Image (cartoon, rainbow, N blue to C red):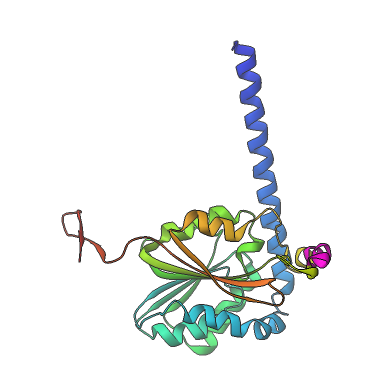
């Protein structure tokens, strides 16, 4: 291949990368605007999805003292149920990109006086922490991310070996006659939550995690729960940096 051809291909790759970056940024900022708009009107969704969210969290079998990550926490709808299981000795760290949602979540923390719950405004695909988490939850958040796959990979990285992730999300009707309504469902999800049809949340989960199970569906299959586990358990780092197994 001559130099000119290599230059053209390199330029094409740079153009494609630049286009993907612009699309990512545009979706992220639109999500911020959408969720800032809905930040004071989340009560209906909070009540309607509370049973399926709480059942998903219960499947994690959280223990007192666990460290839990809540991705796309919104106004903190999962906080009370998670904290009831990890107790005052556990840690709950929440992430959301919407400033208004993050502020509402902090208001909820202040109202309850929870000293072991913290909220960070950050991009879930790149957020990082000094300590890993025993478990994570993502309820009604991955499907609206600009890149669900990168977010899932980041969550996987942030979990301890054997750590679990509980996901509640929505999708168009997967089967049956209600599939005829999918174009309307897609438009509603897009308008209401900036849902991203390019995301394949179940596919990203099964591709990234070593174990994944679809545990529940609701509302004609449009709502679903998946529980995923990172490989390994009982692996601890010894003082000399090597790994030991119980």
Taking depth in this image into account, of 171 and 243 the one nearest to the observer is 171
Residue lying farthest to the top in this orientation? 2
Q: Measuring from the top left, give residue 110's x and y in whole percent.
A: 52, 84
Taking depth in this image into account, of 102 and 221 the one nearest to the observer is 221
The image quadrant where one finds the C terminus is: bottom left
Q: Is residue 126 visible?
A: no
Q: Measuring from the top left, give residue 225's x and y in whole percent.
A: 57, 72
In this picture, residue 32 sits left or right of residue 110: right
Q: Measuring from the top left, give residue 133's x and y in whole percent.
A: 39, 67
Q: Residue at x 30, y 65 (%)?
A: 233
Q: Residue at x 51, y 85 (%)?
A: 80
What's the magenta region?
A: 179-187
Taking depth in this image into account, of 41 and 110 the one nearest to the observer is 41
Q: Measuring from the top left, give residue 182's x and y in whole percent.
A: 79, 64
In this picture, residue 89 sits left or right of residue 1: left
Quarter-of-image position of residue 16? top right
The image quadrant where one finds the N terminus is: top right
């Amino acid at each position: 291949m001559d130099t000119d051809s290599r230059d053209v291909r390199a330029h094409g790759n740079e153009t494609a990368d630049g286009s993907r970056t612009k699309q990512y940024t545009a979706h992220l900022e639109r999500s911020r605007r959408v969720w800032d708009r809905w930040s004071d009107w989340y009560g209906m969704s909070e009540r309607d999805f509370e049973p399926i969210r709480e059942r998903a969290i219960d499947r994690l079998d959280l223990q007192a003292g666990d460290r839990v990550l809540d991705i796309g926490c919104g106004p903190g709808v999962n906080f009370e149920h998670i904290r009831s299981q990890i107790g005052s000795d556990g840690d709950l760290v929440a992430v959301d990109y919407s400033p208004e949602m993050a502020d509402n979540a902090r208001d909820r923390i202040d109202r309850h006086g929870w000293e072991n719950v913290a909220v960070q405004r950050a991009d879930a695909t790149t957020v990082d922490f000094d300590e890993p988490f025993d478990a994570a939850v993502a309820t009604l958040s991955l499907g609206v991310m600009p890149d669900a796959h990168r977010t899932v990979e980041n969550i996987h990285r942030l979990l301890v070996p054997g750590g679990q992730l509980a996901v509640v999300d929505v999708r168009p009707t997967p089967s049956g006659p209600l599939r005829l309504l999918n174009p309307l469902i897609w438009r509603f999800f897009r308008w209401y939550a900036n849902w991203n049809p390019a995301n394949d949340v179940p596919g990203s989960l099964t591709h990234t995690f070593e174990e994944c199970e679809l545990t529940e569906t609701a509302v004609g299959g449009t709502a679903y729960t998946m529980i995923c586990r990172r490989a390994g358990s009982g692996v601890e780092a010894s003082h000399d940096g090597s790994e030991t197994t119980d």
